[in-house]
Amino acid sequence: MKVSLSWLKTYVPVEMKVADLADALTMAGLEVDSLTDRFDYLNTVVVSRVTAVSPHPNADKLRLCKVDTGSRTLDVVCGAPNVRESMLVPCALQGTTLPDGTVIREGVIRKAVSEAMLCSAIELGLGPDAAGIMELDEHQTVGTPLNKALDLSDPVIEIDLTPNRPDCLSIIGIAREAAAIQGKTISRPEIHLEEAGGSIADHTSVSVLNPELCPRYAARLLLDVTVGPSPFWLQDRLTSVGLKPINNIVDITNFVMMETGQPLHAFDFDRLAGNKIVVRTPKPGETLTTLDGKPRQLDPEMLMICDAERPVAIGGVMGGENSEIEPDTTRVLLESACFDPISIRKTAKKLGLGTDASHRFERGVDPDGTRFAIDRAAQLIAEIAGGTLVSGTIDEDARPAGNRQIPLNIRDLNRRLGTGLDAASVSNYLSAIEFRVRQQSDEVLMVEPPSFRVDVSRFEDLSEEVARLYGYNNIATTFPAIPAEAVTRSAPLAAREQIRNLLTGFGFNEAITYSFVNPLSGDRLQLKADDPRRRTVPLLNPLSEDQAVMRTTLAPGLLETMKRNLSVQNRTLRLFEMGKVFFKADRDDAQPDEQEMLAGLWTGNRVDASWLSKEIPCEFFDLKGVVEGLLVALDIADIAFTRLLPEHCDYTRPGYSARILAGGREIGIIGEIHPAVLKSYDLKQTAYMFELNLDNVTPLIPRKKTARPIPKFPSTSRDVTLIVDTETETQSILNNIERQNEELVESLILFDVYEGEPIPAGRKSISFRITYRSLTETLEDERVNTLHQTISSRLIKEFNATLPA
């Protein structure tokens, strides 16, 4: 909703700064999106003096002008009959965008260069005069922007309204809020109607066949109107809020809609069959071509405005071509109605046709405002278009009489809001926005909302009105009482829940498998004879031979789950499981040793197949990224991945496996499942798995959260490429940089690894990007280059590295 300050001031005095008004409206629940001056485009239109005028050599009606703009003299081709030497004129410089959308650029007119444009009042949107160039007073200073020279300023406030505030979809509605903020009262336009021409009942009639969809319909008739351009003041009002003038009749209906919030429609009365209006739903097969020229297939649930034969408008949405106002229209039937919001919303959505009218009707208009709006429009048409107003108004009102009084208990209100308001203050706040308030007792007010507040129906609504008028920022901040005996969850339980949420966020699904596994699981996993995971605990009474021992690793359960999924063609899996594993104690009569473990498995594609992406198989680094993301999200420090030697690989593939370290301590492994292990489980698809010992991970999770401000100084990065031995671990180089604790090094990233020509055999090229940042200053290149050179030199020395040729 756009509101120009000049229009707003016609209904309420605005004595505060417009920026303060915008802030106050926002705090009152009407969020202001922007505040702009609609005359800003005149910044590049400057007061200029015509210093010379000569005939155009190739056009009789054009003149060649020399124009002094204060900073330089321009050549301008002008066709205005009143241009002459020494006159002061507005000159639009290159880049200026005029109200009609014209962008001023240098051009050639009949082989003569024109570097700017001398403008008339109508071209600048400052008046109706189009006969010649706008002539300025001699006291103006050459070079001054026109908006400053003429003191033109009209701020436009754009408000992002919530759907429950249809009352503010009008200038008067915003004026009401501004008046309440300032403690003022609004003044509505006075209506004086001069009726003549007999009774409207002698000319037309209105039949509402679906009153549940149209509870109120009002109509007025005007004769002998003259359709033409609107006066400048009317066009200017519409332009100020972003509407395009069309003709005086349509412009008046749009003006009144913006003024009151009540959409209106004007029919060419002579094009209505039978000179009557029938409000009904469409008959089977009926269609209507709307004002935008598109044929619309009508739904049986839509509400139509019809004449005696056919539909002439989609109720509350858009009129039809068959009854629109045309240049030769002389008789106009005005419509002002109240429609069912749900019906209008469904109709607009089904047709894909959103209009200013439907935007208001689907939120709810003031049912008592239909008469005021139609009388206001009738008065303006009679004044501007010279029409004769037929006596009387047709007003079909099917609304049931009802009592909208709401009891408001002051004690409950204060308890709800956390305030200490008395009944008098609450009454004043509500009365300021035209609520009727009657004191029933010391603690209870009876409140009747005005008809335009269709969103207010209960105590909670009144509480919100009082809160926003009192000021949200005036309500003291309070905190709920927290019992001192509140018990927090244990660290292991909290860690499990956090890990579960994180892995679910990474796209993994939690699996819960049996704690009992096949006694041959150690053989299937290729575990060595002395591996602790072969110390299984047998069950005295197993459920089956395949579940005869307690598990010592989570891997068998996940591999069995993978097998079952592949058997039903579910080939992309991301699974994780948290649970206990059990190791046989040294003594037969002792309880097993238990450890809390976390395992994850990824097989299939990197992302699910879709039109957006190709099927790319997942790989080791996909799962490694998940583990890194998990540990980083848990705030575990000093995370490292180091090569798992072939002799230490069991169920993972040598060369595609790694140890996971935190603080120098091993907390798990990650790698590709060994092909032999896959074969033992009858799996024919590559898979990757990680296992973490949660008993070792949980103590590393910090109990307290720390935060630091976002750096306000920019970062800078440098790349370094080293040629090192193939066996050199990249992680060791990263660790070397991090161990120096250089405060300016913010982050490290490996972005390239290469082996092959021209790199010598047994060597590889690795490239890092080091990001530097200071928390206290902007880094200079010289300082960064010196530090970067120091780091590079140290790496070359410690890792027997060379630089690329």
Image (spheres, helix red, strand yellow):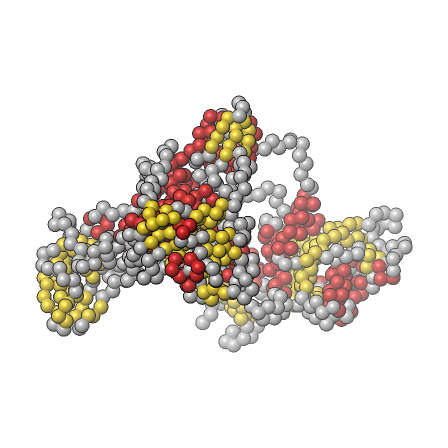
| Residue at image coords 87%, 55% | 539
Q: Position of residue 751 (x, y in %)?
A: 51, 64
User: Which is more toward the observer, 460 or 439?
Assistant: 439
User: Which is more toward the observer, 329 or 438?
Assistant: 329
Q: Position of residue 29 (x, y in %)?
A: 46, 41
Q: Is residue 612 visible?
A: yes
| Residue at image coords 69%, 45% | 492
Position of 312 with respect to 415 (left or right) is left
User: Which is more toward the observer, 235 or 515?
Assistant: 235
User: Which is more toward the observer, 677 or 402?
Assistant: 402
Q: Position of residue 386 (x, y in %)?
A: 28, 52
Q: Quadrant of the C terminus?
A: bottom left
Residue farthest right in this picture: 541
Q: Position of residue 672 (x, y in %)?
A: 68, 66
Q: Quarter of the image holding residue 521? A: bottom right
Number of marks drawn: 0
